[in-house]
Amino acid sequence: MPAAPLPPTAVSEPILSIQRILQQVFGYGAFRGPQQAIIEHVTGGGDALVLMPTGGGKSLCYQIPALARQQAGHGVTVVISPLIALMHDQVGALHEAGVSAAFLNSTLSGEEAQQIERRLLRGDMTLLYAAPERVTTPRFLAQMDSLQERGLLSLFAIDEAHCVSQWGHDFRPEYRALTVLHERYASVPRIALTATADTLTRADILERLQLQDARQFVSSFDRPNIRYTIVEKREATQQLLRFISNEHMGNAGIVYCQSRKRVEEIANLLCDEGIAALPYHAGLDSKVRQANQDQFLRSEGIVMVATIAFGMGIDKPDVRFVAHLDMPKNIEGYYQETGRAGRDGEPADAWMCYGLQDVVNQRRMIDESPAEEEFKQGLRGKLDALLGLAEATDCRRVRLLAYFGEASTPCGNCDNCLQPPDVWDGTDAARKLLSTIYRVQQSGGISYGTGHIMDILRGKPTEKVLQRGHERLSTFGIGAGFTEAQLRGVLRQLIAIGAVAVDGSAFNTLQLTDASRAVLKGDVAVQLRQSVSTPTQRKAKRTPAKATPKVPASLDTKGERRYLALKAWRAEVAGEHNLPAYVIFHDATLAAIAERAPQSLDDLQGISGIGVKKLEAYGAEVLRVVGSV
Ligand code: ADP
Ligand code: ZN
């Protein structure tokens, strides 16, 4: 039996009722951006594809329709999420808000799972979270059949929908099987959500999930509170240490590295420097991984050093920085990863350090992958866009948003806007470099790597140079007027624009390409960032930093004490409930309470983040804590 349309009363008052749910259940005063339009559409039974940046507020877009439709008698919303390790906290957060929810996954005992299945079959819950591989099992399909026959299958929410696409950066083959939802339950509305939005991925999601007729809600992808900075890599680890110790001591952050080995090294190094850091990568035992993730979510001020295996679905709102020690594969990956900073809307940093080797490595990984040439071309195009961003001398945000199809004006909150880089004309240097590669190859029929080419350019008579007679080349020493750093910058940009190829199968030798000619002829100007040399010495080794919680500047001394007392109380409650602290109350909510110094439950009403259930559960305690200061 198809789900019945909403009864007339609900239809005539949907706005009021979803508004009321927003306030009473979640404690928020107003919808953000397109939330209201999405929620109305889905509550009314429409299909939707929602593209919204991380932190934009996607969860409410299916949670409120789930509540509204359950109240109208439509039954259970099934949320498909790939994140088994996070379901416990997601469902915990709903329980805190007084919403009936459960999850089904392999962390449950057989008995627990059966109990939840029985509740499900009674339609006795608003939201059920499950992974795609479970949703498509015959057993689960049979249970959904039974629900549907009784009109109790309300809505499907497909979270992290980009997992269905090989163009997304988290492709999960299990997502492909989700077409069964459409085929088997054609009358049940579906909402698919993702923070990955490039056109290729979007088209792929629509096709794979057969959502061509769904309404698309595309938000602005701008994250104005995130400051983008991309620096030239010199001594990456020292640069990272300086960045954290100068700007983010005591803050929660994520450091992304390419390899597992590097993750371990950097985590150790940060710990040695008194920064509380933990490693996370796919090579760790799953128990250790889960424990580290829990600690990151539950304690304050932890830095997670991780491979890209970490982060999807992490909804910790107060991550203050995301640092990339190695360059990601493409802008989608970069944007998704950096987007994990500052979900609470407070200022946050996205910092990346990037160098020649990153370009070489990424190009080589594509060249050496066993994929079809056409697919590799797609990957190269995506890498080029990221290289363009890294080399940019103009606003980073304008470039990022342009990549997602959004026009914008310089942001004033990225490194290039705040400190416009000096630019120099590298055209002449580029031509000299290309001529050297050409001459060397011509003279002996073989190519050489970066070091040797640099030596010839700069006129260094090394043993290798002399042995091969390369000091007699007409280009020997023609680049002596440039610094090594400048020439490396030139080479990096030439590789970035494809005017030099690096042959990974032959000792990373440098080769000319079709695109070299235009540069050699002087048809293409090469504009380069001036390399600014940063001092290498750092402050003396610090004593391990105390995890002193940061206090909002808006609070006076008394308010500060209330805030700290509330934080201590929150930590206790979170510990008792085995949930991250922010699930109880966000920092911003505690700050608002501390500022208002409430005397009564009435005074607590209307503070953002305090819904009816939380007021009832914690109101008296909060008043006691505030009163005790
Ligand atoms: P996403 O899934 O899009 O990354 P979330 O759904 O986790 O984002 O929302 C990000 C944060 O914003 C959460 O802490 C959420 O509680 C908060 N939030 C969402 N919608 C609103 C709103 N209308 N008003 C205030 N806070 C909101
Ligand atoms: Zn800018």
Image (cartoon, helix red, strand yellow):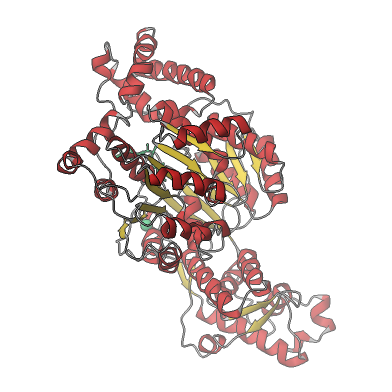
In-image side of 321 versus 471 (left or right): left
User: What is the total number of numbered labels drawn onto the structure image?
Assistant: 0
User: 242 or 281, which is in the foreground?
Assistant: 281
Task: Say which residue appears at 25% left-offset and 46% top-offset.
Answer: 36
Quarter that holds the C terminus? top left
User: 173 or 195, which is in the foreground?
Assistant: 173
Task: Say which residue appears at 47% left-offset and 71% top-offset.
Answer: 424
On the question of residue 557 being in view, the answer is no
Q: Relative to residue 189, is residue 388 depicted above or below? A: below
In-image side of 544 versus 13 (left or right): right
User: 303 or 151, which is in the foreground?
Assistant: 151
Q: Ligand 2 is found in which quarter of the picture?
A: bottom left
Task: Say which residue appears at 50% left-offset and 60% top-offset.
Answer: 164
User: 154 or 508, which is in the foreground?
Assistant: 154
Q: Relative to residue 506, is residue 230 depicted above or below? A: above
Q: Position of residue 30 (x, y in %)?
A: 24, 38
Q: Relative to residue 148, is residue 362 depicted above or below? A: below
Q: Position of residue 552 (x, y in %)?
A: 38, 28
Q: Position of residue 122 (x, y in %)?
A: 43, 34
In-image side of 595 versus 109 (left or right): left
In-image side of 513 versus 287 (left or right): left
On the question of residue 58 being in view, the answer is yes
> Residue reaching furthest top?
628
Q: Relative to residue 133, is residue 539 depicted above or below? A: above
Choose top left, top right, bottom left or bottom right for residue 469: bottom right
Q: Position of residue 280 (x, y in %)?
A: 64, 43
